[in-house]
Image (cartoon, rainbow, N blue to C red):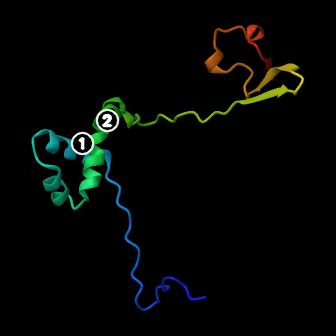
Amino acid sequence: MVPKCKAPTSSGAQPKKQRCIPTLEEKLVVLNLLRDGMSIANVAHKYSRNESSIHAIKIRETEIRQVVASSVPVTAKVTTPGFKAAKDSVTVLLCGNVAGHLIKPSLLYRAANPRALKGKNKNLLPVFWQ
């Protein structure tokens, strides 16, 4: 049986085009240009994108603007010198079976009195404290 299409040869094969995903800043610039009255075709030509990509960005305008508005500014992400964020971990052990019998969860932590529970009565927590 003869194959329907020929497999590409190594001499004639071209490398696959890399997919370029626009960043949020680029999407905002595109949305602002569209809002100012520039056509989708002109914006697509200016940024070397397909018109369907620009149209998809325009359709998701409210979502994109909400993400940008709710994101933390870059200046807020900078930490002060000498400050090191804690990388603590807590282990929670849960136990149950098909019959519905549940055992009180266990909480494992390296310190006896963690700062997160400062001023709280550990005996009133709904877990076994280890």
Q: Horizontally, is 44 left or right of 69 in the view?
A: left
Q: Which amino acid is tagged 2?
A: Val
Image vertical order of residue 2 relative to residue 81, above or below: below
State the residue lying farthest toward the left: 37
As rendered, which of 60 and 103 lies closer to the eye?
A: 60
The quadrant holding residue 130 is: top right
Question: How packed is label 2: few (under 14 Cα within 10 Å), some, or many (20 or more)?
Answer: few
* Residue at image coords 33%, 38%: 74
The quadrant holding residue 71 is: top left
Q: Which mark is residue 42?
A: none
Kindly state the secondary structure of the residue where label 2 is placed: helix
Assess whether mark 1 and mark 2 are in contact (beta carbons under 8 angstroms). Answer: yes
Q: Horizontally, is 28 left or right of 106 in the view?
A: left
Q: x, y percentage for residue 105?
A: 80, 22
* Residue at image coords 25%, 59%: 49
Image vertical order of residue 6 relative to residue 57, above or below: below
Q: x, y percentage for residue 95?
A: 84, 27
Q: x, y percentage for residue 116?
A: 62, 19
Q: Mark 2 sits on what residue?
A: 68
Q: Mark 1 sits on what residue?
A: 28
Q: Which amino acid is tagged 1?
A: Leu
Question: How packed is label 1: few (under 14 Cα within 10 Å), some, or many (20 or more)?
Answer: some
State the residue lying farthest toward the bottom: 11
Q: Horizontally, is 6 left or right of 96 in the view?
A: left
* Residue at image coords 80%, 27%: 94
* Residue at image coords 46%, 89%: 10
- Dividing the image into 4 quarters, which one contains the N terminus? bottom right
As rendered, which of 31 and 92 lies closer to the eye?
A: 31
The quadrant holding residue 79 is: top left
Q: How many marks?
A: 2
For the residues marked 2 and 1, what is the alpha-carbon distance in whole angstroms?
A: 9 Å
Q: Looking at the image, tell me whether mark 2 or mark 1 is earlier in sequence order.
A: 1
